[in-house]
């Protein structure tokens, strides 16, 4: 299989099936839109020098190329799979990007029939930590089957999904260095409102438990990790899981309902990156509006810190003190509630890094993922 490099032209890559129609599933379409027609005939190396991201950084050309190659691995070698959660699709289904409806809700993961831990085997340099990583013993990292599972929920204010930095990169890190089997969740966002995104995650948890043998995972070891609004998705689904499962069972046709009757929708562990926690004080207005369409009756219902009970899953969370988007006080309030309820947890506040740093290797939080892996390993 030909692999793309920085020396390939943008238009050549985009004109290769299925990249043009599906790259947005892994690399946000709003990022690709930064490349205007003026630069369409440029190589990705040239674009890296000419085009910037919205916040002024050079265009993520390496990431774009990596996502294009992952799609080609999916299309030609079947190393990855897009797994639909709400509708039956053909085995080799590759969805169009940005459809944002029930039919486009999917888990992206290594194909267990070809390469069950494809994220580990195709990981780029962006996910490799700049320090030795030994939180998880080597024998666990090399296991092919009976791994714990991790579902990655990218952030984006319930308006978009940062599926590369907060999905693909984390999946690579967790499979390669943590010994997990990774799944990236594409959940519904605005104009879809609560409870649809939470139902998508609940369905993902139940789906993975139902097909645990096929995926080679331990159904009693499911971790969900979410960044920013994705963190709110994970943290809220964990206390709403019973109601969400009831909603799912009502929606499913009778022929599909029975297998899920006895399957729990609650994750076993939760990891949160600079999460949206509260909609009561010092909250993220964009996430609130996008998830609820401004329904005041949902403020307390969806404020996670109000609903922590002793049976809440073990939780890791971190935030940066200088976060100008989602105040670090969200994580502090979560920590207070977890402590009060007696839930095992580790919450960390780092001095700098602002928001959306993902693995954060260039910031003070550079070792958060190592701390999280060690915490859950204990």
Image: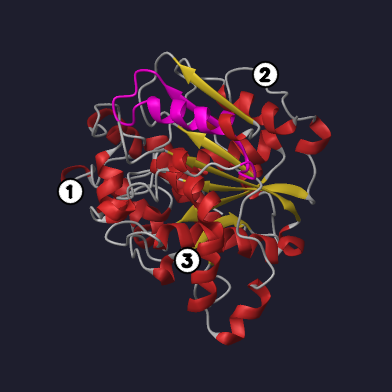
Out of 237 and 34, give the one closest to the viewer: 237
Expressed as whole percent of the image width and height from the top left, the position of residue 189 reads: 34, 56
Q: Quadrant of residue 157?
A: top left
- Indicate the quadrant where residue 198 lies: bottom left
| SS at circle 1 | helix
Q: Is residue 63 above or below residue 134?
A: below
Q: Is 58 a magenta residue?
A: no
Name the residue rendered at 76%, 56% in the picture: 216
> CB under 8 Å between callouts 1 and 3?
no
- Residue 94 is marked as 3
Horizontal side of 287 relative to 203 (left or right) equals: left
Q: Earlier in the sequence, mark 1 or mark 3?
A: 1
Q: Is residue 349 visible?
A: yes
Answer above or below: position of 260 versus 19.
Answer: below
Looking at the picture, how far across and down is residue 260, in whole percent?
64, 72
Residue with the most extreme right position: 139
Q: Which mark is residue 132?
A: 2
Which mark, residue 37? 1
């Amino acid at each position: 299989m030909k692999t793309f490099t920085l020396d390939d032209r943008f238009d050549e890559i985009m004109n290769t099936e299925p990249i043009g129609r599906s790259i947005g599933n892994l690399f946000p379409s709003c990022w690709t839109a930064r490349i205007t027609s003026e630069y369409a005939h440029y190589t990705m190396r040239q674009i890296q020098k000419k085009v910037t991201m919205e916040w002024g950084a050079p265009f993520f050309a390496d990431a774009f190329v990596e996502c294009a190659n992952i799609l080609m691995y999916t299309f030609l070698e079947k190393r990855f799979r897009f797994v639909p959660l709400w509708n039956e699709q053909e085995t080799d289904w590759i969805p169009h990007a940005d459809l944002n409806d029930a039919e486009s809700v999917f888990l992206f993961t290594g194909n267990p029939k070809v390469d069950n831990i494809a994220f580990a085997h195709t990981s780029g340099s962006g996910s490799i930590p700049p320090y030795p990583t030994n939180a998880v013993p080597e024998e666990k990292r090399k296991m092919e089957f009976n791994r714990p599972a991790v579902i990655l929920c990218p952030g984006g204010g319930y308006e978009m999904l940062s599926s590369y930095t907060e999905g693909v990169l984390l999946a690579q890190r967790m499979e390669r260095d943590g010994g997990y089997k990774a799944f990236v969740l594409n959940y519904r966002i605005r104009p879809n409102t609560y409870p649809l995104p939470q139902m998508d995650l609940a369905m993902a948890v139940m789906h993975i438990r139902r097909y645990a043998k096929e995926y080679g995972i331990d159904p009693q070891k499911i971790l969900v990790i979410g960044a920013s609004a994705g963190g709110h998705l994970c943290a809220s689904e964990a206390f709403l899981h019973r109601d969400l499962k009831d909603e799912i069972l009502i929606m499913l046709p009778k022929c599909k309902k029975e297998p899920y009757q006895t399957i729990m929708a609650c994750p076993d562990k939760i990891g949160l990156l600079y999460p949206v926690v509260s909609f009561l004080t010092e909250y993220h207005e964009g996430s609130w509006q996008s998830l609820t369409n401004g329904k005041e009756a949902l403020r307390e219902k969806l404020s996670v810190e109000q609903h922590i009970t002793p049976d809440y899953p073990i939780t890791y969370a971190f935030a940066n003190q200088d976060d100008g988007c989602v105040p670090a006080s969200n994580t502090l309030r979560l920590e207070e509630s977890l402590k009060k309820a007696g839930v095992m947890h580790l919450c960390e506040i780092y001095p700098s890094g602002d928001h959306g740093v993902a693995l954060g290797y260039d910031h003070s939080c550079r070792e958060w993922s190592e701390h999280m892996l060690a915490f859950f390993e204990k």
